[in-house]
Image (cartoon, helix red, strand yellow):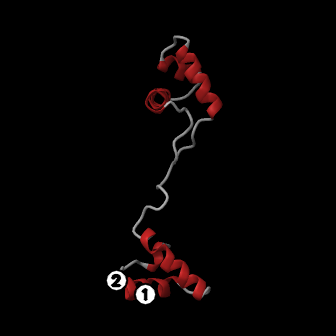
Amino acid sequence: MGKSHSVDLRQRVVSMVASGQSRRAAARHFAISDSSAIKLLQRRERTGLITPARQGRPPGAGKLSAFRDFLVAQVEGKPDITMPELARRLEDEHGLVIPPSSGF
């Protein structure tokens, strides 16, 4: 996953475009890709923000989020529980089959 441009650079690109330069000209001036400048200005028009959007999966997403309390209780009850044991308990009590190697 790529690293986001700094907020300072983002602000300079926005300022240059606001002063009348094109998005592509601003991209060339600051040595960033055309698409970065274009997407930055589109994000600003859409949301009013120039800060980078959050990357990655949203919190609470995934098939195990509904079983969080169960999993925490199992680990608190037996701190040295192995992943295969945890996967077995999840299957036995909830019918959810998860490979132990998934690192849930």
Q: Position of residue 20 (x, y in %)?
A: 52, 10
Check disc 2 and give the amino acid type: Gly
Q: Is residue 9 above or below residue 92?
A: above
Where residue 32 appears, as percent x and y from the top left, is: 55, 28
Neighbours of disc 2 within 10 Å: few (<14), some (14-19), many (20+) = few
Which residue lies at the image location 44% right of the left edge and 83% below the top edge?
87
Image coordinates for residue 94, horizontal then vertical, percent: 37, 83
Name the one closer to the observer, 24 or 64.
64
Residue 10 left/right relative to 93: right
**Of callouts 2 and 1, the N-terminal one:** 1
Note whether 75 is above or below 21 in the view shown: below
When asked about the image quadrant of residue 98, the answer is bottom left
Residue 46: name its quadrant: top left
Q: Which residue is mark 2?
A: 95
Q: Give the residue type at disc 1.
A: Arg
Q: Residues within 10 Å of mark 1 (few under 14, many from 20)?
A: some
**Mark 2 residue element:** loop
Residue in the image at 34% along x and 83% along y: 95
Relative vertical location of residue 98 with respect to residue 59 in this rendering, above or below: below
Q: Is residue 56 above or below residue 52?
A: below
The location of residue 65, given as percent across then percent down, is 45, 68
Taking the view exactly as shown, the residue that stands out farthest to the top is: 20
Q: Nearer the viewer, residue 91 or 37?
A: 91
| Picture disc at residue 88 | 1
Q: How many marks?
A: 2
